[in-house]
Amino acid sequence: MFNKLRHTAVFKHAYAWRLQTPLSPNHSSCCATDSPSSSFNSLFGAFAQAESSKLNECPERGATEAQVLERRYMEKEASTSYTPALKQPRLPKGLSKLHVHVMQVTRSKDLLKPNDHILIAVSGGQDSLCLAQILKDLARSRSWKLQVAHCDHRWRADSEANAIHVAGLSKLWGLPYHLCTAPEPPPSTEAAARTWRYEALAKLATCLGCNVVVTGHTATDRAETLLVNLIRGAGADGMQALAWSRPLEGAGVNLVRPLLTVSREQTLELCLRHGLEIWEDSTNADNKYRRNRIRNELMPYLRLHFNPRTDEALARTAEVLQDEVIFLEEAAAQLLAMSLVDETECVPTLSNILLPSIQSTAHSVGPRYSYSCSAGDMAVPLVPHLTYEAVDQPRSTTLKEKRNRCTAKEESKALKQRSLSLQVLHAAPPALQRRALRQLMSILVPGVAHTHSSIDEVMQLIASSRSGQSGSTGGGTATGSLPSGMRAWVESGCLVLEVEHVHKKAEEQSVR
């Protein structure tokens, strides 16, 4: 609107000068440099030359040539320059830039949808208070239904007072308040406390009918988590550090972190602007915890001596790693589906037993990427530039017929022991081999952390079998008992993984 008014004022000023001379398509003064608005006259002159030929065709009664051109020029400007490209959501007045930023993030990344039932985890610190205030201010425009939850770990003497403080803020916001108290004895480590906290929030959200749990993790938290996992020796999966969203196990509820691009300085500024009383957690100053040492000692040192924007740089690295992990997990799931072997003939096949689990594993990390490659008579999506030849084995029946004859007993056995084609695995890079193995081990033994050492032992089996690939079967080569409760061995050109207790049970039956 301001630009329209400015253009109208320029028109009046320009016409006061222009009407002193006759208007003609060939009049050279339309671009005169001594004009009060030379840039406007230059644009208007070009427009006038294009439109003047139409004036005789469509004369307008009672209007001068200049008035007609002025009106047409304004209509052209209104129909092009000032039409918004995208319809922006209508937001309440008085919102800060941070409100608008969070709204844009939740929309662009599809984190929070209209009419969502949202459970906000509020600790009383500045980040969670900032998040709750922003969501409350935006709730009406997005039709969100909000509730507040506070988790009392019972680690501090003032934890009960902290819970009362959050309850008071919830009443001030007009939001329902719920308290989750840790059982006796309370969790003793940060990892145990985090596990209990997410389990409690997931159960509470399910009971309340909430489909989303939101937390106030910021870009600073993301940077700290990346450093924690880097020092611990994690790979790209660990260093991607706090995904934007992920499902909470067994709850049908999504965990969402809308503030991952927001710094702690921004959350503090918003709390001060809204007069929110921040509850200082005394444990955050205790440097006996590793994360606190990183927050209170390492991060300030990096900002002072290396990069004053360390938080932003590390958070950006975590975001890039997350995108790469999504792609690699999908490619590994496709490799695993390709390398699964039919039990009766050592032939790669897409297993109807494990494929749904593999696909769900890939979907849990993000969108699918599809590539095509051929393996014998099957076309399957896989990693680009990898082509596998069919194993030269006769097939007495088709794969479809074998799948139809698969009984429930065979399915149960397949979920405890599976074979992978070494020929297919050898053609893939080690990075995908490692991820495919971890995915299969997670399916066979769910709920167990499969360590680097377990996967490395199996990777050594794959590497050692490469030398005998052409002639020998590789039988007899095996790992011991893996920490994850599995064992692996090479047999007939295949890598076999089996759950440990299934193998022991079979041995006991044979002895009897």
Image (cartoon, rainbow, N blue to C red):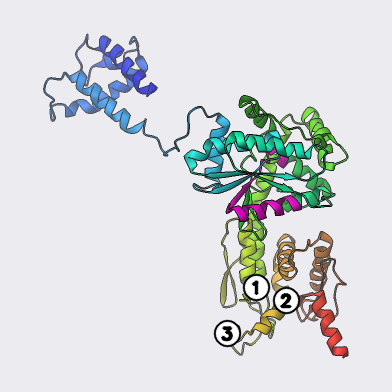
* Vertical arrangement, residue 334 with respect to residue 311, above or below: below
| Mark sitting earlier along the chain (1/2) | 1
Residue 24 visible in the displayed image: no
Look at the image and give the residue range highlighted in magenta: 196-222
- Residue at the image position 27 percent from the left and 9 percent from the top: 17
Is 304 left or right of 243, judged from the image as shown? Answer: right
| Mark sitting earlier along the chain (1/3) | 1
Q: CA distance from mark 1 to mark 2?
A: 9 Å
> What amino acid is at disc 1?
Leu
Residue 389 visible in the displayed image: yes
Q: Quadrant of the C terminus?
A: bottom right
- Residue at the image position 84 percent from the left and 66 percent from the top: 457
The local secondary structure at tag 1 comes to: loop
Whether 362 is among the magenta residues is: no
Is 458 left or right of 339, judged from the image as shown? Answer: right
- Secondary structure mainly formed by the magenta segment: helix
The local secondary structure at tag 3 comes to: helix
> Residue 354 got which mark?
1
Whether 214 is among the magenta residues is: yes
Instruction: Evaluate if marks 1 and 3 touch, with contact meaning CB atoms under 8 Å apart.
Output: no
Residue with the mark numbered 2: 418
Label 1 neighbourhood size at 10 Å, few (<14), some (14-19), many (20+)? some
> What amino acid is at disc 3?
Asn
Q: Position of residue 407 (x, y in %)?
A: 64, 85
